[in-house]
């Protein structure tokens, strides 16, 4: 199952689409119930959503503060997908309950909106999680080694494995390469596999040398077979497998040191 929807050159993760759909449905229902006060309710719910996003990001940054403190401005770069959804959801509920207590005429509409958002978001999150992990394992695929020869991806079973699908022409892929290099050095108990999509060994070698990257386990997938088998049409995409070779998580988009560490810890606590 793909982790997002591709619209031309733009790839949107399902987590973002689910958040948008949940918010839209919540706003529509709240507006309908609020009647003449719909504009006021809509404004309050927008503020609640923004508060939830801020709390979710703040909680994640606090959890991985050491990682972000190396580059403080990276705390503001939300492209890395670093969020703690439960912290955001709690913040939204606290805010709405406070409003409901203060503004009784808006109570029904506000509570209906936040309840709709919660139910849709939770149901969508659970559905995507179950679908993502169902009967998925390290693919039966042999990739080409940089120096020639083949290696079977299933041979990485036995240790938690992270497979990053990337290409040198992809800007977010290029930005996250130093992160994978660092984690490779720090976490030898994890297989970090850099599986290039559609480029030649010469192109990959030139890119690595030009950027002074010392990456291990750099493999070639000339036809993009692995990306196709997992429905990934956007890059970068990162697949997280446990020690038994079972797919536990997928990420479409750029990873920071903090978000890569967070996801690795989930499959290799």
Image: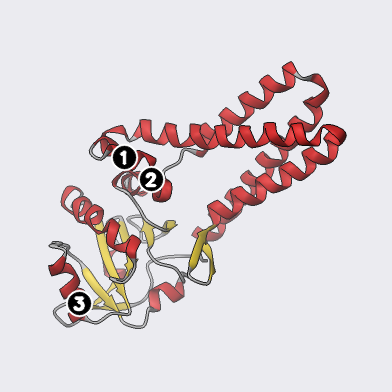
The answer to whether marks 1 and 2 mark residues whose Cβ atoms lie closer than 8 Å is yes
Gap between marks 1 and 2, in whole Å? 7 Å
Q: Is residue 152 above or below residue 73?
A: below
Count of numbered badges drawn on the protein: 3
User: Is the residue marked by circle 2 packed among few (<14), some (14-19), or many (20+) residues within 10 Å?
Assistant: few
* Residue 227 image position (x, y, % from top left): 41, 72
Within-10-Å neighbours for mark 1: few <14, some 14–19, many 20+: few
94 lies above or below 84 = above
Residue topped by disc 2? 77
Q: Residue visible at 60% across and 52% down?
A: 18
Q: Quadrant of residue 63?
A: top left
Query: SS at mark 3?
Result: strand
Disc ID at residue 51: none
Mark 1 lies on residue: 73
Q: Residue at x 38, y 72 (%)?
A: 139
Q: 210 left or right of 55?
A: left
Please give left or right for residue 239 compared with residue 184 in the image: right
Residue 88 in view here? yes
Cα gap from disc 1 to disc 3, whole angstroms: 37 Å
Between 58 and 137, the one lying in front of the other is 58
Residue 83, position in %: x, y? 45, 41
Circle 2 SS class: loop
Rendered location of residue 37, percent (x, y): 82, 32
Q: Provide the residue designation for mark 3.
A: 145
First in sequence: mark 1 vs mark 3: 1
């Amino acid at each position: 199952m793909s982790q997002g929807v591709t619209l031309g050159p733009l790839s949107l993760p399902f987590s973002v689409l689910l958040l948008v759909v949940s918010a839209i449905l919540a706003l529509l229902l709240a507006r309908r119930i609020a009647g003449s006060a719909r504009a006021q309710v809509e404004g309050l719910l927008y503020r609640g959503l923004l508060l939830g996003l801020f709390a979710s990001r703040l909680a994640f940054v606090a959890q991985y503060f050491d990682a972000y403190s190396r580059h403080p401005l990276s705390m503001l770069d939300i492209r890395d997908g670093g969020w703690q959804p439960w912290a955001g959801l709690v913040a939204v509920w606290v805010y709405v309950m406070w409003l409901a207590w203060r503004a009784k005429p808006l109570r029904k509409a506000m509570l209906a909106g936040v309840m709709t958002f919660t139910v849709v978001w939770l149901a969508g999150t659970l559905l995507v999680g179950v679908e993502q992990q169902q009967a998925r394992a390290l693919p039966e695929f042999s990739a080409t080694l940089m120096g020639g020869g083949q290696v079977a991806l299933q041979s990485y079973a036995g240790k938690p494995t992270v497979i990053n699908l990337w290409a040198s022409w992809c800007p977010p892929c290029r930005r996250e390469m130093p992160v994978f290099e660092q984690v490779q050095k720090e976490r030898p108990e994890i297989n970090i596999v850099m599986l290039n999509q559609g480029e030649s060994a010469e192109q990959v070698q030139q890119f690595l040398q030009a950027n002074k990257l010392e990456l291990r386990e750099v493999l070639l997938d000339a036809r993009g077979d692995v990306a196709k088998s997992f429905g990934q049409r956007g890059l970068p995409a990162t697949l997280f497998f446990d020690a038994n070779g079972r797919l536990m998580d997928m990420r479409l988009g750029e990873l920071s040191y903090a978000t890569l560490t967070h996801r690795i810890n989930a499959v290799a606590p």
